[in-house]
Image: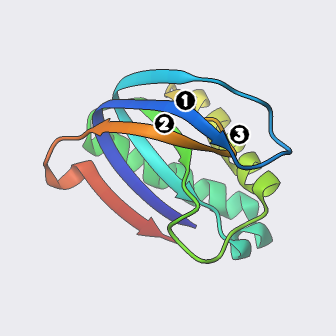
Amino acid sequence: MKLLMIYADSFRYKTTTKTLDDFPEINEDKSIKNALVAFIQAEENDENDSGKTVTKLIKNIKWASKKNSTKKVVLHSFAHLSESKANPNFSKEIFNKAEERLKNSEFEVFQTPFGYFLDLDIQAPGNSQARIFKSF
């Protein structure tokens, strides 16, 4: 898994182009303030142990959220961090499990529409903990 986390004072997205036919039609324009935005790419080898993958994802998100003093998280599929890609249905399952576990830990969680290209607007502060990359 590849994980790029950016703390955003403001994060806005708008659906533009649907890229995966198996996912629902969504037309959404949403803004979220003071959140950790997790750009996530599940890789093919993650499919061997989804439990371990979700646990590492949650651990990293919780750590970065604490460093940025937020309990608000946006899960965003970003299949441009690696050449290896997991099956889209597996990836979406990872997102849903991560959302459930984070909500059980009293996080407010958002998922951007899966299977879409989005217009993005990110306002992020220039401090060292606002941008973190992990590979596991």
The residue tagged 1 is: 110
**Labels 1 and 3: the sequence-earlier one:** 3
Q: Amino acid at mark 1?
A: Phe
Give me the disc on residue 16.
none
Q: Are marks 2 and 1 in contact (CB under 8 Å)?
A: yes
Question: x, y percentage for residue 66?
Answer: 32, 40
The residue tagged 3 is: 96
72 vs 27, nearest the viewer: 27
Q: Amino acid at mark 2?
A: Val
- Whether residue 20 is visible, yes or no, is yes
What is the secondary structure assignment of the residue under circle 1? strand
63 vs 39, nearest the viewer: 39
The residue tagged 2 is: 74
Q: Decide: is 100 above or below 6.
A: above
**Labels 2 and 3: the sequence-earlier one:** 2
Picture quarter with the N terminus = bottom right
